[in-house]
Amino acid sequence: MSIEQAYEILERSIIYYRGAPVGTAAACDPNPVAANYEECFVRDFVSAALVFLLNGRPEIVRYFLDTVMHLRGRQQVQRGHSSSGGLMPASFRVNAAGDGLDADFGDRAIGRVVPVDSAMWWMFLLRAYVVATGDWDYAHQPDVQTCLREILDLYLAEQFETAPTLLVSDGAFMIDRRMAVYGYPLEIQALFYGMLLTARELLLCTGAERAMLDMLDLRIGELRDFVRVYYWIDRVRLNEIHRFHSEEFGPDVANVLNVYPESIPEWMDGWLDADAGYLVGNQGPGRVDFRFFSQGNLLAVLFGVTNARESDAIMHLFEQHWDALIGEMPLKIVYPAVAGKEWMHLTGSDPKNVPWSYHNGGNWPVLLWPFVGAALRTAREAMAVRAIEAVERRLGDDNWPEYYDGKRGDLIGRRANFFQTWSAAAFILAHEILAHPDRRAMFNLFAFTDTAANLAPQAD
Ligand code: GLC
C-alpha cells in the first residue's frame, strides 16, 4: 500500500462548487452503502483539512469554513422549532442543478439525529486555519465574529442543568445512531471543552463583552474539573465506587450522582492494572456508562481535559489492552460491545450495530490520527509507530474501508464503504507526522498554552 494511493483518494474526494473546492465527500466508493456518503460531512472533513493545512493548501479549508458558516441555521421552521443561528449542518452537497447547496441539519439524516459536534469541529478548524496561516483577520471579520457568538449563544443557553457538561440527545456526534450515547457523552464534553477554549481565543471581546470572557473562563474551569472528578476511573476510584453508600441527600455527600455499586459491569473486574485509568463514556444521575470510548479519551488527552498523569494512564490502558483496543486495525471505537438483550435495548436491535461491528465495537482507521497525536503528546512514540504499522499491513490492500468488524478488528466491516476519505486522510496524517518530526507541530493546534492551565483550581 502506498501513501500515493491515499493522496489519490483525498484528491478524488474534493467537492467543487462554483469552481471552488469547498469540502470532501465522505467516501469515493462507486457503490456507497448510503447515498449521503457522497456529501461533505463536517466531522469527516476535519481529517482532510488537517492534511491540507499540513501540506500548505489552506484555501480549501477557508472555502469550507465560509461555506458552512453561510449554511448555518438555515433549517426551515420544523414541527414547532426554528433552528438557531449557531446550529451547523452534519453534511452538505451541491444540488442536482449545481447552482446551490443542500444542507442536512438532521432533517434528512437516518433517525433524524442532530449534529451537536458540527459547530464544535467547525470552530476547531477555524482556529487551526488561523494558527496555520497567521490569517487572524479572517477570524476577526464581523461575520465570523457574529457566527462565533451565535454558536456560543446556542451551546451556553441555560436550560435545566446542574452540571457544567453539555446535555445532548442520542447520536449527536461520530456515533450517529442509537447506542445509548444520549445524556452527557464524553466525546461531546471533550469537544465542548476544546470549543470553549477556542472561542476564548478567537472572540474579540471588548468593553461590556468582557463579561462573556469571564463566563467562558468559569465554565471552562468547571467543565474540566467536573470531567476529571466524575468521569475519571482508575483502581482507586473503582474501589471507592465499589464501596459507595447510596441514597445520600444534601450538599456534602461522597456519592454525588447516586451511583449504585451494583452497576459496575462484570467485565471491569480485573480490567485496570495499577497504572491504568480512563474517562468513562457517560455520566448522569445513577448512571455511569463504563464503556471505553476511544475518540473521547483521545480528544481529552489532546485538548488537555486530562492532566499529564491521567493522559499517561489512558495511553497505558491502550498498551495494556493492545489486542482488545487496537487489534489488527487501529482502533476500537468503543469497548466492549453490547450483546444479547442489552444490544436489543441499547441499540433498538440495530442490525448494523450487532456486537463487534460498526459503532458497537468496530475498529475505525480514522481514529489513527488522534491516537498518534495522543501518543506523541505523552511521549509514547513507539506506540504510534506500532499502530501505523498495523494500518500499513492492510488498509490499502483492503481498499481503505470505513471500519472493520470483529473482536480483533480483523474483518472488513460487513457494510463498510470502500475508499472512505477519512480512513485515507488519517493514514496520511499519521504517516507524514511520524516520517517528518518537524511536522509534529501540527498537534500544537490542540494546545492552548496561556489559558486552560491557568483557569480555576485544578482537580489534581
Ligand atoms: C457514519 C458515521 C459518521 C460519519 C458518516 C460519514 O454515519 O457514523 O460518524 O460522519 O458515516 O462518514
Image (tube, grey):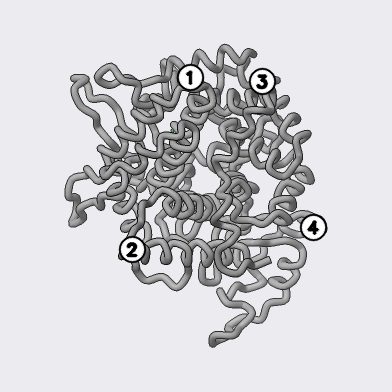
Q: Earlier in the sequence, mark 4 or mark 3?
A: 4
How far apart, in angstroms, are the residues tagged by discs 4 and 3?
A: 32 Å
Residue holding disc 4: 270
Q: Earlier in the sequence, mark 1 or mark 2?
A: 1
Q: Quadrant of the N terminus?
A: top right
How far apart, in angstroms, are the residues tagged by discs 1 and 4?
A: 43 Å
Position in image of residue 38 (x %, y %): 37, 24
Residue holding disc 3: 394
Between residues 116 and 46, which one lies in front from this camera angle? 46
Name the image quarter holding residue 330. Answer: top right
Please say if 144 is above or below 311. above
How far apart, in angstroms, are the residues tagged by discs 4 and 2?
A: 41 Å
| Residue farthest to the front, as pictured | 207
Q: Mark 1 against mark 4, which lies toward the viewer?
A: 1
Q: Earlier in the sequence, mark 1 or mark 4?
A: 1
Q: Mark 3 against mark 2, which lies toward the viewer?
A: 2
Q: Mark 1 against mark 3, which lies toward the viewer?
A: 1
Question: As drawn, is 345 to the left or to the right of 441?
Answer: left
Q: Residues within 10 Å of mark 2 (few under 14, many from 20)?
A: few
Identify which residue is drawn at 57% across, 37% down.
357
Q: Quadrant of the C terminus?
A: bottom right
**Mark carried by residue 157:** 2
| Residue type, mark 2 in image | Ala
Please say if 74 is above or below 427. below
Residue holding disc 1: 10
| Residue type, mark 3 in image | Arg
| Residue type, mark 1 in image | Leu
